[in-house]
Image (spheres, rainbow, N blue to C red):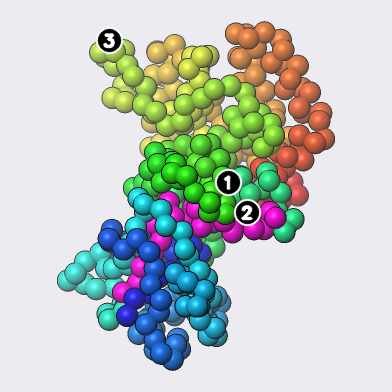
Amino acid sequence: MDIYLDENTSLLLVRAVANNDALALTPSSVCEPAALDLKRPKLHRLDAGSLLAYLGVPESRPLGIVVPRRQDRLRVRGISCSVDAMRREGAPFMQLGSASAEDPCPIVPSETRVFVQHPAHIVLSMARKLRRLQLENKLSDVQTTLMLVKLCLELCGTYSHDPFEPNGGRVIYGIGQRLTCDTLREYLKPAGSEQGLTLARKAASLAYDLSGSPQESFMGPALFFSSRLGGLALCDYVANKKLELSDEELSSIDCRQITPDFTLEDYNSVVEYLGEIHAMNDNPHKDHARSLDYQTLGKRLFEFWYTDVDTQKHFMRSASRIVSVIEQYDGPAVRKRFERLSRDPKFLARQQTLFSVFRPWLRGR
């Protein structure tokens, strides 16, 4: 028997694999779902008891599955069934399995094959869902765009949210990329009529690769996105790109390679977000050595700690440091624009939306 999971359950398992070394997702050749092969569909007939228990089905949530046609939909307690007729090449389903054949993970069913949506397909599926909520006036255009960008940054990044508590649970860092922005954009590039496709393309065009943490994913949009999305649009930037250094420059610094969170190439500056881990173990020494390397290379370093950006007021005060440097190059109009935005209630409302999407634990601050 084969089970094809919807975007919600697929995203949960994509995150679960990052949090559980015993699980794995392997590429498959399956590009579209098939109807569930059960004459009398019941949860206990799926031969997936351990997986259902892990997912909290049906006590906490239903099992989300997809079928290819409306006539294949199921109406069974504990199963949420939707139609997925999107036919787009480049993102086949992935099969849930054990990381080790010698030590099978009990969560993985032994007889039933479980197929998880490819991360690129998850993005498009989520875009469709968000677009429907927008059309029902439950979400604004700004909210839907930022929510999908946030998902893209996670899937194209090197961290993963908690599967069951994505807004407040433990974050796993230093994982491999599940998706690249280029792969996502190529997947979305062909013409199509899928609901949410325009939204998905917009989010993909704004996302960047290799974000290392939720806070770093917040900093990019907050500093550099358009003011229409609640960002300050300070300047052009490059995210997570290794500095190209000459042999002479490399010989003058300690680090063999330096990859800033954000490089402001037109202003010879870099931005680094320093999370809690930077205060642990030997990291303060490493950060100090890196800051000295930036000085040696003649690059201005802007460091941001959590307390620098934990509220809108603190964030604007901290961002003002970058504005001071940009206006040295571009003139006083930069400062005037920044101050105008800081007094504009409509912009501040959009900025609060950005905060609430990327940092939901700070609502109301």
Q: CA distance from mark 3 to mark 1?
A: 46 Å
- In this view, 122 is above or below 198: below
Observer-nearest of 41 and 316: 41
Which amino acid, mark 2? Arg
Observer-nearest of 325 and 60: 60
**Residue 316 percent location from the top left of the image:** 70, 30
Which amino acid, mark 3? Glu
Q: Is residue 76 left or right of residue 17?
A: right
**Residue 142 percent location from the top left of the image:** 68, 44
Residue at mark 2: 131
Answer yes or no: do the residues labelled 2 and 1 have beta carbons within 8 Å? yes
Give the magenta-colored segment's residue range.
113-135
- Please, what secondary structure does the residue beneath circle 1 have? helix
Residue found at the far bottom of this picture: 40
- Please, what secondary structure does the residue beneath circle 3 have? helix
Residue at mark 1: 199
Residue at mark 3: 248
- In this view, 193 is above or below 255: below
Q: Give residue 355's quadrant in the image.
A: top right
- Please, what secondary structure does the residue beneath circle 2 have? helix
**Residue 174 percent location from the top left of the image:** 37, 46
Whether the magenta-drawn stretch holds residue 187 is answered as: no
Q: Is residue 12 left or right of residue 93?
A: right
Residue in the image at 81% along x and 30% along y: 344
Q: Earlier in the sequence, mark 3 or mark 2?
A: 2
Residue in the image at 37% along x and 22% along y: 243
Q: CA distance from mark 3 to mark 2?
A: 52 Å
Observer-nearest of 103 and 279: 103
